[in-house]
């Protein structure tokens, strides 16, 4: 009776790239090359299905029929090469490697040189003419086999090697002579026996079988499981096992090994690029003992082989329609193609290659857009440290705003502002920054703080300004009084140069060469293609006309967040704002507000003019008032010192009044305190002044024929009562100014959704709000109960390391925050069909979060002007991926 | 063609108490008395439906047919009394009063004495033989009519009255002679004409019609709308209008007016109780010019009438099966019943009456339970100011923990603790309290703070201890240095007596007499009936054995929250806790923790022993560590002073080390900082020590044969990763101690749900938690983004006043917080069927919130031991109401 036998084993020439699920990535790639007739060392793949079957019965045993099929395939390899597995004359050696559908680099096991025993050792020596090589291959096999198959740690082997080297008086293993290696092999066999409790298997079939099972087992190793958890790879995929004939690049001058890219991975230039090492094996390249040659060296030495190689490489690129990274070995003049995979590349290369390949007809525009990762675009958009530069890293901090900058160290904002205005490039170095530092930050080229996280003041402001920034550089000791920093044992004083890389968090002494940001026409083209593919609009957060200009230049379609309080912080306004806060009656406050009115009006006029024809969402005052005053402790210490110095009542009056007001405004948890619309409700005169400034600015522009489109946004709304109260105030001012000016500016009134309650009461609130803008910084804070000022330094970093959090919720939208947003979008739009919904939190510039925003059906994302291109690309990725492109 | 005419008007004897929706409360009550044959001044009710019809067409006009029906009913009144409306000989006067289904006291309008004009004035004089009375009735009509019908403010009338009094040289209106009143009436008619732009209507039908329409209009007055908003009364109910013949109690010695309660509203004693005023009208009683007599005076003066009255009153009580509050007037020996309604009563009377009425067979046990409002029970459970006491209120604050207490003022916790231990009754007066004040609070009889809200430290701790507490008494200036307070212009120094009423927020100077808390057997009976009716279990929050004993005595079925950090605050432990926090290595920390272990073990042993056989949920450490250290500013000022005083390095070392650590632990928003399970994860040794203490205590008790049932609760969990990490730590210690002791204590491990994210990730978290306990204090804080330390004082009070919030979310569960809880309950139980869910936030003792907990299907509520009876009753109310009882 014939039993239908399940196929567990595929020869390389039976597979193809479409069989990736069954054969794994490596198996499918090698199969594809084999099918295309390229010279691949023969071999076969045991399927992922076999791995699943291996685990299916719980015990872990090879499924019936597998081994017979493997042996048949092995015989075919022997016959193709005319070698015999375990043969004493012309032995076949094989490698056994894992290969899952999704690459898990370094996670699973590999064994090389299987098929060596005391018989075939001689054969290998005869075949290669190199006894040292054969012995070395054997001792490597024993060590690798012991570890992988029997779990024997490497220390004892390494100690023996060390002893052998010291006996021989040499530095490297490669210098060991056959006479050194022979006793070493014996010693290795003894260690194996002692540790594994059995002899090293001399039967090569047993070696192979144990190796295959070991690879299957490595799928369930702790580190592999942990890696899959981290990367979100399902546990039930299983791994394939590739058994392949060994070839050797170290058999003389006509042998060698190398890697070839089909285009330059740094620039995207269309020419073969790579490294070549004659008379060497792959692991010699990895060990880095010998310097590699450029691939052109192969062209000079073996032009035929070079032509053959480039022919194959170009065919592979055309076949995969993407840049390939090809590994090859030349064994005594014969080229063997070992592996092909999609090449990693820089941002610049990614952009250029993607656009070029469309021109070459290889890929569509949509595929080109998807070929460039948003993170790669970031590289391109900012200056970066020259990869060729050799510079000493003094310290590392949290990369908070991308780009590299060099400047002289300055430790206070006034000097930074002064020197910056004189045109000196400045790096502002602080322990942390506060709104009072902003004028110095504006004139600096980069910011470095020794404390804080990615949502600290320094980080937020720097990203908004597009300036490189490093925060939380705990290895940098900042001495503000002495005006110097100490890091990595070096002292940098005011006026001395340093360089920061806000993309990596590295701090360097002196000036390190940088590469300028790219402004290539190909980038423009790619972004235009991205725009065609996306559904989400991309707006920008901008507080000043200069930011709005940058946003427009980068393709922003509106301003999603204009923070009015930054305007309050500027030098000429802060005294008025402080006087307003210190006012003890509404009347006094209104006097100060009337001084602010013309200033705010001009601010709004500038930004509305710049954005003519596009929406500008202006948020009413948000931060707690005490942020505009000096810190409580500072004032208290000042008063205490005055008292100690015997100051009289008159001298104390002002400081004490300030202290009292600061004390009144003091809050245990200011983030959850008197701020946002709570201020606007308790002090409606502030709301009225701000709305009047907006309306007067808009009316004046309209009179000039400029299409001003202000929208008023109420912050920190949690209940519909707050929204309707603020809405009434706003509408009254809009009506009043319209009546005064005789014009009508249609002003939309909406709210931030940044308090969890607001998201859950969206239906009610949408009745009073014409648009929603998710303030996901605060929404994430409150949903997690994480104070963004402290959480990263205090515990979020530890949580990320311990795997308690999969990602930083202040960088990438948390799924539960997304759930809240989803409730708000759905219920808000049910209550008000067509409700416009956007996001203006930091997540609005984060690629993964932009995907979530697309899925949620938002109308737009708003981010820093400098991230607009990244957001445009991310939005296109989200849309194209959702369409299955 | 006959048209079916809609019935808009009901004679009193056509209605009944079941027709409350149509006739309003007053109309239905009067109708019920009329139906029962009691002597009610005849009249009729215009229905609430007519009011709705009045508004239906938008313009506000009486529906067709109504007026004709009213006139028919009026003719019947005339014929019953033998008087004529507007008649010159024996005139009928009527009152017009509103009467909605739900009482809206003082919100809507009433007009008395309608039917007076120049003709009938003489008739009234002849009828009553009292010209002064007739003229006074007329001028009152003009004034009331002007205000209600024409919106004429009362000032001009009052000025004329004032002028008349001064011309006559008298103090009160009652002393004005007819010769004074005559010109006044003319002047009133002139004012009416000038202000209303028309003559005062002499036609009495026009008077009546305008009055009826005015009452309908008053339904939509601003204050009525605002009241309905506040009380949640629908706008579309409408009001009925009652037109009733006037009777007069001021026609001589055989006339009079009064109020009778069918039982004593203070004690519930079963005897007629009330006030009587001979030869007077109801408004004289209200004006308080003459002192009323006890109702017994009527028995002596007019025994027949008294018997008639008490007969009616008792019949009404039997009919309504509840204590009645009856208004009556005697006109020349003839008793008229004007109104009957359910009597308001004290908590004591409510309890006693409810239990008595069950014994009398009037009501069921369920109805008896529903008759006592939880708020009334609170009165009974705490000492209160003697209602008879006359004392000056110095200031008012936020009532934070109920009950009254008298004691000597003390301004620091150490003195409070010392004097309290000596047996002196102490009131601790502070600006605010912190954990360092707790030892003083324990020994005080009451607490008064000049700042803070209902969730401030003082309020929370006082409620937990069952001590009267007032917070946020902003009229009290506390001078801690001088050890005195100033309030209401008085100074109270240390050692001087004061009295506080934590139920009302009133602060009194000196000792004010108080009434002790009731411990009546009838209360016990009522609570047993409540227990039979409820589904929710009632647990208590208790940190010490003495609290647990109180909880047990009050009927608690478990401890829902044992806060371990309060134990840390006690004098003997705080130095160890501080040393633990100041430890710079894990090893140092573990040394200090090992000192805490035996102390905590004894704490747990005490509470577990007390609660033998019942669950005790012990929460692991929750507050941020800096709470155990002195305040940053305090330490900074101390160091600054030391420096200023020229302290040397040795003297500075300790303080500076402390300052550094306090600085490290400092957070911008500690409520959202390093606390709860975040501490337990970063410092697992603290979790391990606490769980070991719990386990060792439980094992020791088990060895004694005591059924200890500890449950371990992890605070501030937001992600399943936190829960599983803490669970692993806890399980490891449980296993280790079980192994050491050779016993097994089944320990349930659960979590607080107090972070919004946890509620929305309940399904995941339930996979790792065996129970949920809603920490609704924090959950409300985070959901609203309101810091509970400040929000009430800074803006929540203003929001409540402005109607932006309907209730204080820290007192009564907000609907959106309830929505979050509902998601957590549903999804948590889906993931883990039978998941036990309770609440341990302050809301667990709030009656309205307990109703929500019942509806959510929670298993238990946990509250202060002192609120357990209130919670038992509230839980019964929720269950009985849900069943429609």
Image (cartoon, coloured by chain):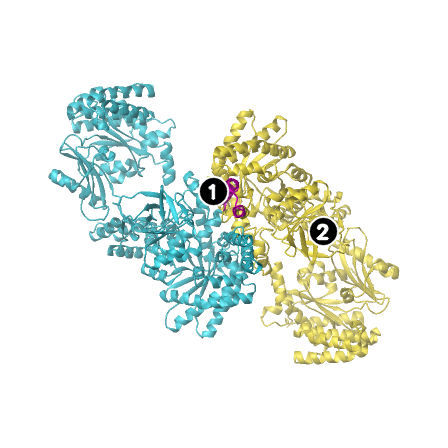
Chain colours: A yellow, B cyan
Could you say which is closer to the camera, residue B50 or residue A131?
A: A131
Q: Earlier in the sequence, mark 1 or mark 2?
A: 2
Task: Name the chain under label 2.
Answer: A
- Whether A393 is drawn above or below A858: the answer is below
Q: What's the distance in space between the residues labelled 1 and 2, CA to CA?
A: 49 Å
Residue A719 has which mark? Answer: 1
- Where residue A677 appears, as percent x and y from the top left, is 50, 40
- Quadrant of the image occupied by residue A742: top right
Could you say which is closer to the camera, residue B461 or residue B434?
A: B434
Residue A498 has which mark? Answer: 2
Task: Name the chain under label 1.
Answer: A
Q: Secondary structure beneath disc 1? A: loop
- Quadrant of the image occupied by residue B317: top left
Q: Answer few, some or many: residues within 10 Å of disc 1's Cα (few below 14, many 20 plus, some between 14 and 19).
A: many
- Whether A76 is drawn above or below A397: the answer is below
Could you say which is closer to the camera, residue A216 or residue B494?
A: B494
- In the figure, is residue A731 to the left or right of A450? left
* Main SS of residues in magenta: helix
State the extent of the magenta-drawn residues as a range.
A639-666
Residue B848 has which mark? Answer: none
Foreground disc of the pair 1, 2: 2
């Amino acid at each position: 009776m014939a039993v239908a036998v399940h196929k567990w084993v595929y020869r390389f020439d039976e597979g193809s790239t479409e069989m990736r699920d069954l054969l794994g990535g490596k198996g499918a790639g090698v199969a594809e090359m084999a099918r295309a007739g390229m010279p691949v060392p023969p071999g076969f793949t045991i399927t992922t299905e076999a791995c699943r079957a291996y685990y299916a019965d719980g015990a872990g045993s090879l499924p019936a029929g597998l081994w017979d099929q493997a042996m048949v395939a092995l015989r075919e390899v022997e016959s193709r090469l005319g070698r015999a597995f375990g043969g004493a004359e012309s032995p076949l050696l094989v490698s056994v490697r894992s290969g899952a559908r999704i690459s898990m680099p370094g996670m699973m096991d590999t064994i090389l040189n299987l098929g060596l025993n005391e018989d075939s050792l001689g054969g290998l020596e005869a075949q290669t003419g190199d006894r040292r090589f054969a012995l070395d291959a054997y001792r490597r096999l024993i060590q690798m086999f012991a570890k992988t198959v029997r779990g024997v740690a490497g220390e004892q082997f390494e100690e023996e090697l060390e002893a052998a080297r010291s006996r021989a008086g040499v530095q490297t293993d490669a210098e060991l002579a056959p006479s050194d290696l022979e006793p070493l092999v014996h010693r290795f066999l003894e260690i194996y026996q002692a540790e594994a409790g059995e002899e090293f298997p001399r039967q090569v079939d047993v070696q192979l079988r144990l190796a295959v099972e070991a690879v299957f087992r490595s799928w369930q190793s702790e580190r592999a499981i942990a890696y899959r958890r981290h990367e979100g790879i399902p546990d039930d995929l299983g791994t394939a096992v590739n058994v392949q004939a060994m070839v050797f690049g170290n058999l003389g001058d006509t042998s060698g090994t190398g890697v070839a890219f089909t285009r330059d991975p740094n620039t995207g230039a269309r020419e073969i690029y790579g490294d070549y090492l004659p008379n060497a094996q792959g692991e010699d390249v990895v060990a880095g003992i010998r310097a590699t040659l450029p691939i052109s060296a192969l062209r000079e030495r073996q032009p035929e082989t070079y032509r053959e190689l480039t022919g194959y490489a170009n065919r592979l690129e055309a076949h995969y329609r993407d840049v390939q990274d090809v590994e090859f070995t030349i064994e005594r003049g014969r080229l063997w193609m070992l592996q092909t995979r999609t090449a990693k590349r820089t941002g610049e290369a990614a952009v250029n290659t993607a656009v070029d390949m469309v021109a070459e007809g290889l890929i569509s525009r949509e595929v080109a857009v998807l070929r460039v990762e948003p993170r790669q675009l970031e590289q391109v958009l900012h200056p970066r440290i020259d990869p060729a530069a050799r510079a000493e890293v003094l310290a590392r901090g949290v990369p908070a705003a991308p780009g590299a900058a060099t400047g002289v160290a300055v430790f206070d904002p006034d000097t930074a502002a002064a020197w910056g205005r004189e045109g000196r490039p400045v790096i502002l170095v602080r322990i942390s920054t506060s709104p009072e530092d902003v004028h110095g930050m504006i004139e600096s080229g980069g910011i470095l703080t020794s404390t804080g996280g990615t949502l600290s003041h320094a980080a937020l402001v720097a990203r908004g300004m597009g300036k490189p920034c490093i925060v939380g550089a705990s290895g940098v000791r900042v001495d503000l009084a002495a005006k110097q920093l100490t890091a990595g044992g070096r002292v940098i004083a005011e006026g001395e140069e340093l360089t920061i890389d806000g993309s990596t968090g590295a701090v360097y002494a002196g000036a390190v060469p940088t590469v300028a940001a790219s402004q290539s026409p190909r980038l423009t083209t790619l972004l235009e293609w991205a725009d065609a593919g996306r559904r989400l609009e991309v707006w920008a957060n901008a507080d000043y006309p200069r930011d709005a200009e940058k946003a427009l230049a980068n393709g922003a379609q509106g301003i999603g967040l204009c923070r009015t309080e930054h305007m309050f912080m500027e030098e000429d306004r802060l005294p008025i704002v402080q006087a307003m806060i210190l006012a003890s009656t509404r009347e006094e406050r209104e006097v100060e507000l009337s001084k602010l009115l013309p200033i705010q009006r001009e601010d709004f006029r500038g930004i509305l003019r710049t954005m003519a024809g596009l929406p500008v969402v202006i948020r009413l005052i948000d931060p707690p008032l005490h942020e505009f005053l000096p810190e409580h402790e500072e004032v208290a210490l000042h008063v205490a010192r005055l008292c100690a110095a015997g100051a009289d009542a008159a001298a104390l009056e002002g400081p004490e009044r300030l202290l009292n007001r600061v004390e009144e405004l003091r809050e245990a948890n200011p983030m959850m305190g008197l701020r946002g619309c709570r201020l606007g409700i308790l002090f409606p005169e502030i709301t009225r002044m701000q709305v009047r400034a907006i309306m007067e600015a808009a009316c004046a522009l309209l009179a000039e024929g400029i299409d001003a489109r202000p929208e008023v946004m109420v912050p920190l709304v949690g209940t519909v009562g707050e929204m309707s109260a603020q809405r009434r105030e706003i509408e009254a001012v809009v009506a009043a100014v319209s009546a005064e000016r005789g014009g009508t500016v249609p002003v939309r009134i909406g709210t931030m959704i940044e308090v969890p309650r607001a998201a859950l009461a969206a239906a009610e609130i949408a009745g009073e709000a014409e648009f929603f803008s998710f303030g996901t910084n605060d929404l994430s804070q409150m949903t997690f109960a994480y104070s963004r000022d402290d959480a990263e330094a205090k515990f979020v970093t530890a949580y990320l390391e311990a795997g308690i959090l999969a990602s930083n919720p202040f960088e990438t939208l948390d799924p539960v925050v997304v759930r809240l947003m989803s409730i708000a979008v759905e219920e808000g739009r049910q209550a008000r069909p067509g409700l416009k919904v956007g996001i203006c939190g930091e997540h609005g510039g984060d690629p993964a979060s932009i995907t979530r925003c697309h899925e949620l059906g938002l109308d737009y994302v708003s981010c820093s002007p400098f991230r607009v291109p990244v957001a445009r690309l991310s939005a296109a990725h989200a849309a194209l991926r959702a369409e299955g492109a």
